Amino acid sequence: MSGEAFDEVFDVVVVGSGAAGSAAALEAQQGGADVLVVEKCDQGSAGGNTRVSGGGWWVNRDPERARIFLRALSGSFPVADDVVDTWATETAEISTWLKELGADVAMSGDYHTDPEYLSVEGSDSYAGMDTIEGRMGNGLLHAFLISALLERGIEIRFGTPATRLIVESGGVVGVEVGGVSGSRRIGARGGVVLATGGFQADTSMVRDYLRIEDHVLWGSPASTGDGHRMAQAVGADLWHMGNMMSITGVRDTEGVGHYLALWNAHNYLWVGDDGRRFVDETAPPCHGHTLRGGSHELFPLRPFHLIFDEQMRAAGPLSPAPDVLPVGWNLLMNGSRWSADNSDEVEKGSITSAESIKVLAEKIGLDASTLERTVECYNTSCAEGRDDHFARDPGTLGPVVQGPFYALKVTPLLGWTNGGPRRDGRARVLDTRGDVIEGLYAAGEISSTYSWRKDGGFHIGDALAFGRVAGRDAGTRA
């Protein structure tokens, strides 16, 4: 590598300071490498989805069974054997590694105590989810990782976006960055680790790859696919670009949303723009996949309408407060709150109200007679204790009979995307021929292992595991 071509040179340069980037930097330094982390956001908003996620990683009690679990979850979209092997081995070591770094690790007693895919072979490898202090969310994992970087003297340059990978003799030897001090060329003897997050905040990429026309963000607005474009520019192949995690959401402001969690009562149904039901509304949202027609499908992919009654309105908030689920950009970073009895949302018009289903339909632009028949048919199912259309659990069939009646537009709340530069089991990025692009690594949401279904704590687990692998390999290469 020609040192004269660079303003400065490090052994390893990591792009991004979330779980994957932090893990890569810590592991590389632990192996003796000189490391720099560059982060496009300022310190107050850095960390990507790690900062606003649940911040937990799944507890892998048996790597051999974990291999079987991942392959079964992947189904018809298999993942390369070397990636599966690394994933199964490395995710089993996360809690021990974090404890060695000084983290207070404890198992969450409230969320993901059991696998979501309990019936899938290999699920017995899933022993729950570990978190910092046994608590979900609130940016606890991100805060610990940043403190660990700073305590070890690893430099983090906030407000420093990477703009281009530098290639020499067919391999990546550095990265060009911008920022207040202007453009700089930074060399990387061992390699550059891309840990830049997903592309859910880039509307064009979401439409092109996920075919979603309208969505709001649950995670970081900084997830704009920067690393994807840099990797593609040097010949990277892509994988898993059609996979993601969305959940039911409600649009708030500036492209972000609230998580719609219908936990307090069952007096509701969902209808499409045709005024008809289309799915079992209570099917568990297994991290972006819902069981429908006997198989798991990505859901939701388009907006629809929540129809409910006064019983549901008075039962409690339609979106959880931070003391219940401290997760999401809108909640943690914007400080936005949903009212305890949904009355504020009714008053400001986010929730439409009417004294009859007919008038409610007219207000939201649906055919009144169709919606009236749909609600009547649903209420008949409730009375009979059997949903012949979508097999909704009889215990969740709450009638929509008590006025006033309400409607709320539900919009896909995009948590994260899965696809990005294809990598091998050593986190090395591969080109379109399947060859390694020397000196280029990817870890975390930019290049998730998951081709299809995934369980609770899988994304943070994957980011930490392959972040460590990338940092270790790049450091050794230096």
Image (cartoon, rainbow, N blue to C red):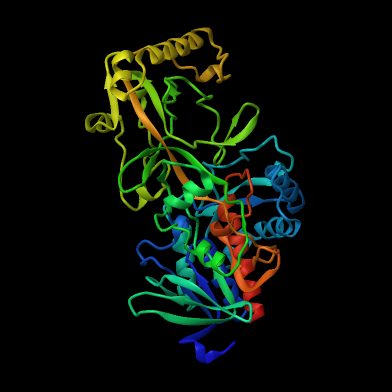
Q: Is residue 460 above or below residue 40?
A: above
Residue 155 figure quarter:
bottom left
Image quadrant in which you'd find residue 467: bottom right
Residue 8: where, in percent of width, then height?
A: 48, 86
The relative height of residue 110 versus residue 351 in the rendered view (above or below) is: below
Check the picture and name the quadrant holding the C terminus: bottom right
In this rendering, the count of numbered labels is: 0
Q: Quadrant of the N terminus?
A: bottom right
Q: Is residue 207 left or right of residue 98?
A: left
Task: Let me know if residue 136 appears in the view.
Answer: no
In the rendered image, the vertical position of residue 288 relative to residue 182, given as above or below: above
Q: Name the residue furthest left.
A: 347
471 or 76, which is in the foreground?
76
Q: Position of residue 201 (x, y in %)?
A: 42, 53
Reply above or below: 221 against 365. below
Residue 273 spot, x, y in % from top left? 41, 25
The residue shown at (57%, 51%) is 241
Res 256 visible: yes
Q: Residue at x 56, y 68 (%)?
A: 101
The front one of 414 and 48 is 414
Q: In the rendering, at what x and y percent does residue 407 appear?
A: 34, 25
Query: Farthest residue toward the bottom?
Result: 4
